[in-house]
Amino acid sequence: MSRTKVLPIPVLGRHAVNAYLLLGRRPVIVDAGTPGSGRRIIDRITEYGVDPADVSLIVITHGHIDHFGSAAELHRLTGAPVAAHVADLGPFRSGRAREPYRPTGPMGRAMARRKELHVQVEPFEPDVLISAETGLEDFGVEGRVMCTPGHTAGSVCVLTEEGDLVAGDLVANSFMGLVPGRPANPPFHDDPAGNLASLRAMLALNPTTLHVGHGAPLEPDRVRRWAQREHHRLTRLEAAGRLTAPARSRT
């Protein structure tokens, strides 16, 4: 068995938006960053010693434009197929994130007003449609794509055999990665309770590290403690009738 290395690809700032390179028998890219990030991602994987033509797969974790914004460009630059969940086909095919955004707190409410989140990006059609847990062995990585709905209906993570969880926006670092090592919600969740259930399901698999879309890697026990606090917070909101219903999936 070839050990899989998880290498960060900063797309915006040091940790504000991350893609990842998985190095196994063949390289796999997870997420495609913001629009116009394709060349930056290619430059970084080249620095890691990877020929872009060797990339076997591009996995998109969900239908927000800071994660799929350069998927079509990256597909052209590498020739690799793109894998994504069927429940987020609407955003992928339209090039627009599903709206309205559902903020998780003050930062999300502020960010929802930023025009960059409402632009249309180049759409794409996934070559590999995910609807259930999917092994990556055929693409050269000892790991699995795991379905983790909640942040969006079609959110997924990648769990390697070594226990590295490339978690997308299942959880983040505080303030979009500005406070490293401190777990927090990302600015938006379509379904906060559903996302928390997905997070707890992934933690039950005992990952060694959570590699997130926004911020530095997170230590699982610290995320578990945060998840317990988040459970209590959502329970209080639900009891007060202040927990919004999940956004409906549309393709």
Image (tube, rainbow, N blue to C red):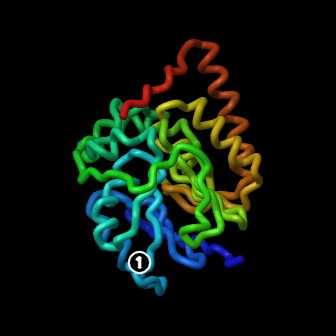
Kindly state the secondary structure of the residue where label 1 is placed.
Answer: helix
> Residue drawn 60% across and 29% down?
193
Observer able to see residue 58: yes
Q: Is residue 59 above or below residue 50?
A: above
Which residue is label 1 attached to? 44
Relative to 177, is 199 on the left or the right?
right
The answer to which of 179 and 81 lies nearer the viewer is: 81
Image side of residue 131 versus residue 163, left or right: left
Q: Nearer the viewer, residue 240 or 147?
A: 147
Query: Quadrant location of the N terminus?
Result: bottom right
Q: Nearer the viewer, residue 237 or 48?
A: 48
Camera sees residue 173: no
Residue 149's image quarter? top right
Question: Which quadrant would residue 241 be assigned to in this image?
Answer: top right
Residue sitting at 48 percent across and 62 percent down?
Answer: 30
Q: Quadrant of the C terminus?
A: top left
Query: What residue lies at 31% left-to-right and 68% top-to-bottom?
Result: 38
Q: Amino acid at mark 1?
A: Arg
Nearer to the camera, 96 or 226: 96
Residue 66 located left or right of residue 184 = left
Residue 43, above or below 71? below
Residue 105 drawn at (x, y percent):
48, 34
Mark 1 Cα shell of 10 Å, populated few (<14), some (14-19), many (≥20)? some
Q: Is residue 101 above or below residue 48?
A: above
As drawn, 240 above or below 135: above
Q: Residue at x 46, y 49 (%)?
A: 129
